[in-house]
Amino acid sequence: MAEVLEQSVTVETARELGLLPEEYGKIKEYLGRNPNFTELSIYSVMWSEHCSYKNSIVWLKTLPKDGPQMLAKAGQENAGLVAIGDGLACAFKIESHNHPSAIEPYQGAATGVGGINRDIFTMGARPIAQLNSLRFGNLNQERNKMLLRGVVKGIGDYGNSFGVPTVGGELFFDDSYSVNPLVNAMSAGIVREGKTVSATSYGTGNPVFIVGSATGKDGIHGATFASGDLHEDSAEDLPSVQVGDPFTEKLLLEASLELIETGAVIGMQDMGAAGIICSTSEMSAKGRHGMVIHLDKVPVRQKQMQAWEILLSESQERMLVVAKKGMEKDVMRVFDKWDIHCVQIGEVTTGTQLRFYMNAELVADVPADSLVLGGGAPVYEREYSVPAYYYENKRFSIDDVEEPEDLKAVADFLLSHPNIASRKWVYNQYDSMVGAANMSTNAPSDAAIINIKGTGKALALTVDCNPRYVYADPEQGCAIAVAEAARNIVCSGGVPSAITNCLNFGNPYNKEVYWQFVQAIKGMGKACRKFQTPVTGGNVSFYNQSTDEGPVFPTPTIGMLGVLNDKSEKMTMDFKEPDDTIFLIGETVNDINSSEYLYSWHKVKNSPAPFFDLEKEFRVHQLLKDLISRKLIRSAHDVSDGGLFIALAESGMVRGLGFSIETDFDCRADAFLFGEAQGRIVVSVHPGALDAFVNFLAESNVEFSNLGTVTGGEILIDDQTFGMIADAKLRYDTAIGNLMDAV
């Protein structure tokens, strides 16, 4: 057997690559010798937090992963896979591209979109919908405007060119995201059950191909870059940001799906974080086989690339394909047709050893199992402690907050607040109708509704998280994120099915940050069990902080999939006609905790999470499903950011209709209108269905109240005018655009 090329490395070299001294010792144990620089680089990326989840896997294992519709559990494949009926399945996943977007927002966001779509189509599913969750600092600062412009343009340019509609998302602003924005991208695709491809490798002698774009130096050590704090010299890490090409990705999509139809594929995996080394090691470990790879055969864009650079490059639009021996020509024929690079770079071997050659010289020889999650990658359970602010939050009392005299001024303020106002400035840059599957663009609902052609079904998709709630109380706040996602699905006529998550936190070595993470996982697990929405997988993104500004708000973004078994039951959020009666389903609570009103109007930064009762929330959802199936309501919209007033205004704006309501005198008027207590839904009822509606609710065990009626355009609260809905809509629609245009 050939000897491995030696290159002098020390424990200090390991430190510089982000490895701990004890991890360096563990590497030597696995290899039975000192690693060379190429091998040490391999471990530095594969054992980075971004790839190995070494500081999170202990807690991730506590999340519910089983369900009757689950076809692939978390960690088994590139994305989650859930049966949706009619012999079809949905592959869906969400991932972060935070650090790259902080350094180069356009490419950082664009390649995030490209990467998440490859995770879907490498499984054999055709992507049909994209969503995103974005967080930035104060829009009064020019840098944050620059980041927002770049990220939105990157998402739009890539997604629009790739030809998959962007159907939904969320946008949130807070000072904690000024240095480190969050860019989370989600994709969903459809595949026939039994037609999926696994990210595996087996069969001694089977050929290994690299397909897609040529390999360059972009993205080298990107996984390591994503596993550290941002600092003043982070801009020097620009080579760690990948460069995307959506047109090549479109060709790669079509070629991959066509290849799968030939029956030649054993396994296929996207080359995302850590590139070739990640794909070869994960596929080999899963299939319990090894590989011999010749790096000098990899198509490259730059001359004199070193072996470790080729191995670690995160150049985009590339995949690894393991094919059946004897079908090499079939593989080549498909990729030649689509004018895509397709080069055999190795073959599958017995055992689980990965051997990498460069110009016939053995440059790395490592056991695949030692590199991967669930194998030899280190696993840590970090210490954590409760931060002092948590106890300060608990001391908050609504009685210490003076109720404003001018409630209309508060309403106008919230309508134009960037955390509440229309995202029109953003979504106008996205193509939401390409593919003609989006059923929500002209008939808005709380979740995006995607038509499944040739069936009576539709998908409901949403992303949700209010990080202010999670910061206030991580367990309660993360449970609320799951509940709000489920509420949005139910309000749209769907049944929640499963979730994917993107867990954005600060440095896990910070005990208070790790406490936030642990508590959030507990809250997520509790809520997912209640709503029977197993966790299909996702992404952990630690180190979202800067050395100067500290960590971002803890942001466990929830991407939820639901199914409309009968798409004729799609429910929209808009009021339909004047004189329809408006009801509030759910409990009215004298609560302004962690509301935008309290945080931004009163500038009170410390309060608990808003009122939330998981059992009551669940009962509200079940009741709403019955109301929709019995056709007793004409609209449904959840009460969330901005409270009841904003929910009513958003329901009215679509058709230019106003509302006349009375406040609940058992509750402070500001809490009634602007509080964000959970588990509440605004519905409208046609006069002809009113008796049946009231009788049905009277027999339920859910609280409800008659708020008032839909008007032709005026907003009246306790007979006091709050103006016309058209004026409210103008304020709501133009707020973010005005901020972006302001100098």
Image: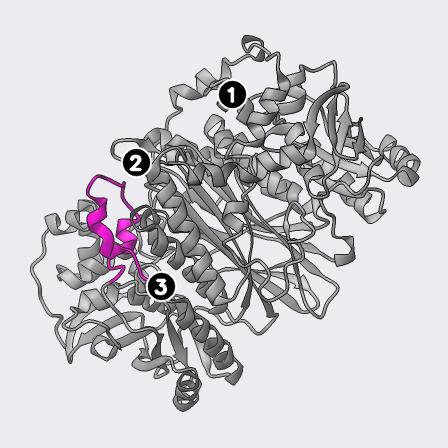
* Rendered image coloring scheme: one colour
In the picture, the quarter occupied by the N terminus is bottom left
Camera sees residue 78: no
In this picture, residue 402 sits left or right of residue 660: left
| Residue situated in front as seen by the camera: 123 or 587 | 587
Residue identifier under label 1: 601
Quadrant of the image occupied by residue 402 = top right
**Residue at image mark 2:** 509
Residue at horizontal 71 percent and vertical 68 percent from the top: 86
| Label 2: few (<14), some (14–19) or many (≥20) C-alpha neighbours in 10 Å | some
Stretch of the chain drawn in magenta:
218-244
Mark 3 highlights which residue? 244
Which of marks 1 and 3 precedes in the sequence? 3
Identity, as a three-letter code, of the amino acid under mark 3: Gly
Tell me how far mark 3 sits from mark 2, CA to CA.
33 Å
| SS assignment at label 1 | helix
Residue 353 locus on image (x, y percent) = 27, 70
